[in-house]
Amino acid sequence: MDFGMENRLSKIFKPKSGKTVMLAVDHGYFQGPTTGLVNLEKTIEPLGNLADCLFITRGMLRNCVEKKITSSICLRVSGGPSILRELSNEDIVVSIEEALRLNASGVGMSIFVGAENEDRSIVNLGRLVNEAEKYGIPVLAITAVGKEMGRDARYLGLACRIAAELGSRIVKTYYCKDFYKITESCPVPVVMAGGKKIPEKDALKMTENAIKEGASGVDMGRNIFQSTNPVKMIKAIKAIVHEGADSKEAYKLYSKK
Ligand code: 5RP
């Protein structure tokens, strides 16, 4: 691996644990002002420096993030449809030059396996990898799950494997039963998205399970920024991901006055 690629990956995955706690705040790119992200600047202010990496769009990075932030940046570069339309109709909307200008340590886009525009999203992933690899930028592929698509290990395993085959350096997917089957058949690091907000105790248990089943960390949004106490929640997640805490210990940390 060349220096640029390895160095950028080390800004995402902490060298000591080899894992990452990414904070996903990109939801507005198709759903507008999401609960917890209405004032993104306010959400990020206490959390930004606690995350290893922020997963964010370029507009929000420019306008809502303190320039001295210590966490690295992974830029969402796909977009197109809003929540009102067919979500798989995405394209790449940010150039690699822009990612370099914004000092991104990685770029990310969704693929829509099984959806109407499956093939276009996968071809776009190949194109993005071609461009990003020229400059040593890792590509993170997200296995988007539409309403009609399943969330079982067979479906998500298929989507993750395709993402890795196309050259993604990191894959983000959702937790499901037999998650280990996904990580087992995916040769690049898999990070877990949190999905819809669930009780903190359950989100911590899901994180513990994902790590035990081979995840290289999380790229979590709603279960952190919609938590009653987002700062305590990200700290509890970090304890599981980086320090090997179990979910009970992490929940104690979360609940501590
Ligand atoms: C939105 C995304 C999010 O980054 C991803 O779903 C993680 O956020 P959450 O933990 O809230 O699911 O890709 O399209």
Image (cartoon, rainbow, N blue to C red):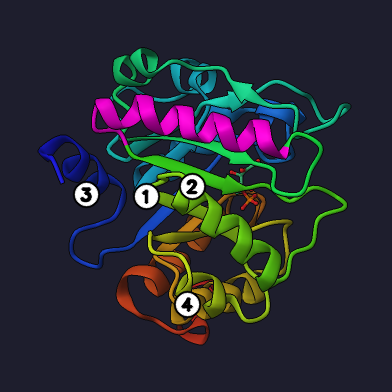
Which amino acid type is shown beneath numbered disc 4?
Ala
* Along the viewing direction, whichever of 208 and 44 lies nearer the viewer: 208
- Using the image, determine if residue 184 lies above or below residue 170: below
Decide if residue 68 is on the left or right side of residue 20: left
Residue 58: x and y in percent read: 49, 20
Which amino acid type is shown beneath numbered disc 3?
Ser
How far, Cα to Cα, is label 3 from label 1?
16 Å
Magenta stretch, main secondary structure class? helix
Residue 246 image label: none
Q: Which residue is mark 3?
A: 10
Q: Which sits earlier in the primary sequence, circle 4 or circle 3?
A: 3
How far, Cα to Cα, is label 4 from label 1?
16 Å
Note whether residue 38 is visible. no
Q: Which residue is mark 2?
A: 23
* Along the viewing direction, whichever of 124 and 193 lies nearer the viewer: 124
Tell me the residue at 68%/26% (across/down).
90
- The mark tally for this picture is 4
Decide if residue 100 is on the left or right side of residue 170: left
CA neighbours of label 1 inside 10 A, class few (<14), some (14 to 19), many (20+): many
Residue 9: x and y in percent read: 26, 46
Q: Point out the stretch of residues depicted in magenta.
A: 118-137
Decide if residue 111 is on the left or right side of residue 145: left
Tell me the residue at 67%/50% (across/down).
226
How far, Cα to Cα, is label 1 from label 2?
9 Å
Q: Which residue is mark 4?
A: 250
Q: Which sits earlier in the primary sequence, circle 4 or circle 2?
A: 2
- Disc 1 vs disc 2: Cβ atoms closer than 8 Å? yes
* Along the viewing direction, whichever of 135 and 58 lies nearer the viewer: 135
Q: Which sits earlier in the primary sequence, circle 1 or circle 2?
A: 2
The image quadrant of residue 178 is bottom right
